[in-house]
Amino acid sequence: MRLAGQLNRTESGWRAIIVPTGLNDADALENLLADHQAAGRLVDLRATSEAMVAAYRLDAGQSLGIALALIIIVLLARLKDIRLTLRVLLPPLAAIACTAALFSVFDQGLTIVHLVGLLLAAGIGLDFAIFSSTLAGDARSRARTNRAVSLCALSSGGVFFILGQSDIGLLRMLGLTVATGILLSWLFARLCQPPPAGSQ
């Protein structure tokens, strides 16, 4: 079963992955394979994985840019006020930037799992900002909105915080990233909330 897991049948025959041990000079092995025109090829798994992560980050950045542009267009079309649109966008963007900075410094850099967590937190934080900025009319509406948003932040953030206590590294990383993003999104949404209607 172990051998079968390392073999892969192709149209030209069988292919296997062999992990060399005690290899001190990878370039010499690569040159040896090239000199003998061997069918085998040396693959640097670390360099390959780093290239894949870099490509994913580039694609994710482009997708995020397109998504952000679409969100701005939709919000502006719905709210019909550029200042209100910016007030809605500022809290989640600030929360994601702060969360990314925190985990980049204290968690030895951002990984794909962090990026996924930041996307989740951004979506939830955008909801907080929309409700906090558009449903806080008079003092009564403001109080109801703040209670509802706080309850959502507590429930969603609490779930991801519990997930962040997992012994599995990926789950812990995802949970803590999203929980931190949600907490900061809630905080910034409250700070950017407009005053109640009729207040001086």
Image (tube, grey):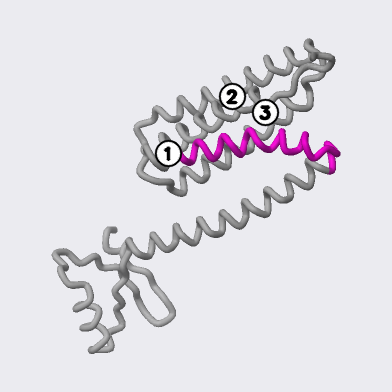
- In the rendered structure, which segment of residues is drawn in magenta? 77-101
Image: 60 above or below 166:
below
* Residue tagged 2: 187
- Please identify the quadrant where the N terminus is shown: bottom left
Real-space Cα separation, disc 1 to disc 3, in angstroms:
22 Å
Provide residue 116's location: percent of width, then percent of height: 52, 44
Q: Secondary structure at mark 2?
A: helix
- Please identify the quadrant where the C terminus is shown: top right
70 and 16: which is toward the camera: 70
For residue 141, what is the image quadrant? top right
47 and 134: which is toward the camera: 134
Q: Which amino acid lies under the numbered mark 1 shown in the image of this protein?
A: Phe
Q: Is residue 104 magenta?
A: no
* Residue at the outermost top position: 140
> For the point 56% across and 34% down, which residue is it?
95
Real-space Cα separation, disc 2 to disc 3, in angstroms:
10 Å
14 and 73: which is toward the camera: 73
Report the side of 74 relative to 187 (left or right). Answer: right
For residue 44, what is the image quadrant? bottom left
Do tag 1 and tag 3 residues touch (Cβ < 8 Å)? no
103 and 31: which is toward the camera: 103
> For the point 58% across and 38% down, which residue is it?
120
Mark 2 or 3, closer to the camera: 2
